[in-house]
Image (spheres, grey):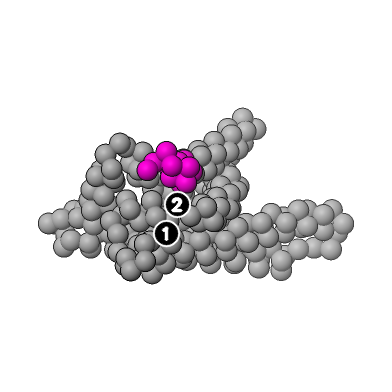
């Protein structure tokens, strides 16, 4: 039970982060040549300054996110192993086990795709180790220009879309499961509402995260 609760809470933390991240990305759409997007990126590094030294809050935030990811994955693997060990040999149970294992495999592989994408995302847009779309000899760009450079490459947008499909499939299943674990699934009506909300959140995330990359690729954001 503790593993399920940990998985639910950490999953909701990550969903909240995705929604906030999506909101920040919308600043790419403002017609100010990236001024507000760059200021927003700088604000994240100076948040709570001078109460905290510059950049400390951002690192604390990253540590919380990293801990959430690790605990989420640990809980997922622990629950999967527990399900395997407790599976019976009755035909009905075997059928249900096949159904659950299919969902588990989807979630596990989706999680792996997401983790690989996050690593690529950090190396590209935070550390600037991967400089997709940069001009020759350029080693660093302002945050707004990093995004423009990366999404000017069609294959980067395609990889981003594949990753977001994995994210949204994960969210559509996990959002409903998280609230069920936390006791919100109390009736047939509540179950339908949770499933609807899960699909809405997943769809919103996909559309919201894909708008800036597509607009950059087709030249609407110059």
Local secondary structure at mark 1: loop
Local secondary structure at mark 2: loop
Residue toward you, 72 or 181 = 72
Pick the quarter of the image with the C terminus: top left
Magenta-tinted stretch? 211-222
Badge 2: few (under 14), some or many (20 or more) residues near its Cα, within 10 Å? many
Find residue 130 and report its image quarter.
Answer: bottom left
Residue 26 is situated, as x and y percent measured from the top left of the image, at 37, 40
Which residue is labeled 1 in the image?
Answer: 133
Residue placed furthest toward the left: 50
- Image-based side of 45 in relation to 16, left or right: left
Residue toward you, 212 or 94 = 212
Tag 2 and tag 1, C-beta contact below 8 Å: yes
Find residue 79 and report its image quarter.
Answer: bottom right
Residue 190 is situated, as x and y percent measured from the top left of the image, at 58, 33
Badge 1: few (under 14), some or many (20 or more) residues near its Cα, within 10 Å? some
Residue 213 is situated, as x and y percent measured from the top left of the image, at 46, 46
Which residue is labeled 2 in the image?
Answer: 152
Tag count in the figure? 2
Q: Is residue 83 above or below residue 151?
A: below
Residue placed furthest toward the top: 189
Residue toward you, 217 or 177 = 217
Residue 18 visible in the displayed image: yes
Residue 19 visible in the displayed image: no
Q: Is residue 189 above or below residue 166?
A: above
- Image-based side of 131 in relation to 75, left or right: left
Pick the quarter of the image with the N terminus: bottom right
Instruction: Say the numbered circle drawn on residue 93.
Output: none
Residue at x 26% of width, y 49% of height: 38
Residue at x 87% of width, y 57% of height: 91
- Image-based side of 50 in relation to 10, left or right: left
């Amino acid at each position: 039970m503790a593993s399920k609760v940990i998985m639910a809470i950490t999953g909701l933390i990550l969903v909240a982060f995705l929604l906030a991240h999506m909101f920040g990305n919308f600043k790419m759409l403002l017609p100010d040549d990236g001024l507000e997007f760059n200021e927003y990126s700088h604000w994240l590094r100076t948040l709570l300054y001078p109460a905290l030294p510059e950049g400390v809050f951002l690192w604390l935030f990253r540590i919380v996110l990293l801990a959430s990811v690790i605990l989420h994955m640990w809980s997922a693997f622990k629950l999967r192993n527990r399900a395997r060990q407790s599976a019976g040999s009755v035909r009905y149970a075997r059928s249900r086990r096949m159904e659950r294992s299919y969902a588990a495999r989807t979630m596990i592989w989706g999680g792996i795709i997401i983790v690989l994408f996050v690593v690529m995302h950090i190396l590209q847009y935070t550390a600037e180790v991967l400089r997709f779309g940069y001009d020759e000899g350029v080693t660093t760009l302002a945050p707004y220009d990093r995004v423009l450079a990366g999404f000017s490459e069609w294959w980067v947008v395609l990889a981003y879309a594949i990753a977001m499909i994995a994210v949204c499939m994960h969210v559509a299943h996990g959002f409903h499961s998280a609230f069920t674990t936390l006791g919100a699934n109390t009736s047939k009506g509540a179950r339908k509402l949770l499933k609807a909300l899960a699909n809405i959140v997943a769809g919103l995330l996909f559309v919201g995260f894909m708008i800036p990359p597509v607009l950059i690729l087709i030249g609407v954001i110059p």
